[in-house]
Amino acid sequence: MAGAAGPRAAPGAAGGDGDDSLYPIAVLIDELRNEDVQPPLESLATVEETVVRDKAVESLRQISQEHTPVALEAHFVPLVKRLASGDWFTSRTSACGLFSVCYPRASNAVKAEIRQHFRSLCSDDTPMVRRAAASKLGEFAKVLELDSVKTEIVPLFTNLASDEQDSVRLLAVEACVSIAQLLSQDDLEALVIPILRQAAEDKSWRVRYMVADKFSELQKAVGPKITLNDLIPAFQSLLKDCEAEVRAAAAHKVKELCENLPTEGREAIIVNQILPYIKELVSDTNQHVKSALASVIMGLSTILGKENTIEHLLPLFLAQLKDECPEVRLNIISNLDCVNEVIGIRQLSQSLLPAIVELAEDAKWRVRLAIIEYMPLLAGQLGVEFFDEKLNSLCMAWLVDHVYAIREAATNNLMKLVQKFGTEWAQNTIVPKVLVMANDPNYLHRMTTLFCINALSEACGQEITTKQMLPIVLKMAGDQVANVRFNVAKSLQKIGPILDTDALQGKVKPVLQKLGQDEDMDVKYFAQEAISVVAQRLRKLDVLVKDREEPRIPGADKNLFLIPRGPGEDTGKGPACQLHVNTRDTLAQLEIAELVHFLQSRE
């Protein structure tokens, strides 16, 4: 092609107007055209932008898997060495993520070189490089021979865990999990546990936080013996830490720690060595610590059993149900199922009710929303009698809350309660109270009535919907507020599939036709949509009725067959053939009804 640029276009040729700023882009495009994709990735692995470097390293890691061992040593390992010895810290940080993918398939001589480069990066002058090396230390340890782990990785781990930068030390804690999985119990006690104890008492709260956050993983890695001798004392100190963030992180791990203890003697260990510290956290000055504990403490009941739960945990649960912080009370209530399985919820009922009432009336609407979502669970555990006596009024009060999200959640809550307690309960307890709201002076509350009917109609069934709910919906079609009227149209569209032909034809259709002539455009629009859905429903019902009345032809296909009309039988108002459907096959009937409608429309 005439005038085409060579492999590397001159600066003036980068753009038609000679814009030199486009030259780097032209160079990059040329590099990307190269069959060897590693050079551009090597360049991208050295750029300043962290996201770009990480993506380049990720791509290089994938490419390394496509190399043969020979090609790996010839092309990929030299690339890693160049990055590891680069002048800029960015290239050296990128190199840290590539050692583990090339090491396993390298020759012994090359492996030694790779380990040497990694050792150099672990002691790099730049903290960012040491951080990158510490973050990959565990990953690199997994692909090394056991002797190399003991002689090289453990000393590196020890140095990084004592680094002057806390950001490096906390990443060494992460590496400890991987290293601990590779060593024997004796090696662990001699080489790793002293460093772990040191990290649990580190002067930086961020390092102690990391120990607390990784505690369950550390516990599994070191095994039960070291856990009992070394980790439990460390955990006790973390539960009493001076920093609230550390105490909260440790509190989150209480249940997992107890679950992972050896089954033999577990209850005694928890009661004697863990619970005394938990009792102090129940009255902690920081609400995040108390909330973290409340989210897991109920799970201890299944571990400790009925007697220990009643004796040791129940007083803590009751205290937390009275806590001034709503998140604490909410976390206890959200995990009641754990206690219900062990001792039954009646033990908590007297303290539970005041806590629920306070949460239901909390000034923060998100707290009110959260307790609504747990109401069906509470209802199932407390039983219908307790619910009707103590909690029913709360559920109805939420329907008139000033926040829409609360009213919406309360509506869905009623539907779940009906599914749990049955239609008879709904008919006697819920439906009358909902329908009374149709006369509320606040139009938002009248609209909530419609939303409730939409949600309850399917759960309550055709009879209750037709006899009790439909008349109220039809009456509200004359509401003065347009928002209410177009929601009437939407409600009729929603409950239409539940109603029978007489109700649709005689009651719903006339009201929708009247709303279809409404002066408000929104009312008219939703009414016309509803008319279309109701008409479709009527056609389906009509087809089903006709199918029941038409005689069967012996020997015909039991699912579907066509009978062509004879001469003179075609009235000009229907398809050229009649359809017969097995009335038991509802899905097929509905599909055929659609086909009949299509054929009629074509004529």
Image (cartoon, grey):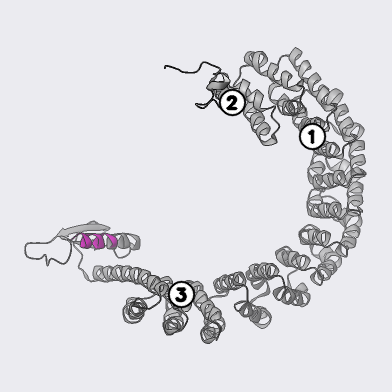
Mark positioned earlier in the residue sequence (3 or 1)? 1
Pinpoint residue 579: horizontal percent, then vertical percent.
22, 61
> Label 3 vs label 2: CA separation?
63 Å
Crowd tier of the residue under label 2, counting other residues whose Cα lies within 10 Å: few below 14, some 14–19, many 20 or above: few
What residue lies at 79% left-to-right and 48% top-to-bottom? Answer: 260
Q: Which of the two marks, 3 or 2, is nearer to us in this view? A: 2
Q: Identify the magenta region.
A: 594-603
Pinpoint residue 199: horizontal percent, then vertical percent.
89, 41
Pinpoint residue 603: horizontal percent, then vertical percent.
17, 61
> Label 1 vs label 2: CA separation?
55 Å
Position of residue 574 in the picture relative to residue 595 (left or right)? left
**Local secondary structure at mark 3:** helix
Mark positioned earlier in the residue sequence (1 or 2)? 2
Q: Is residue 93 magenta?
A: no
Q: Nearer the viewer, residue 439 or 224?
A: 439
User: Which residue is labeled 2 in the image?
Assistant: 20
User: Which residue is labeled 3 in the image?
Assistant: 487
Q: Nearer the viewer, residue 271 or 96?
A: 96
What residue lies at 56% left-to-right and 18% top-to-bottom? Answer: 10
**Local secondary structure at mark 1:** helix
Note whether residue 186 is visible: no
Figure quadrant of the N terminus: top left
**Local secondary structure at mark 2:** helix
Circle 1: residue type = Gln
Residue 144 sits in quarter: top right
User: Which residue is labeled 1 in the image?
Assistant: 181
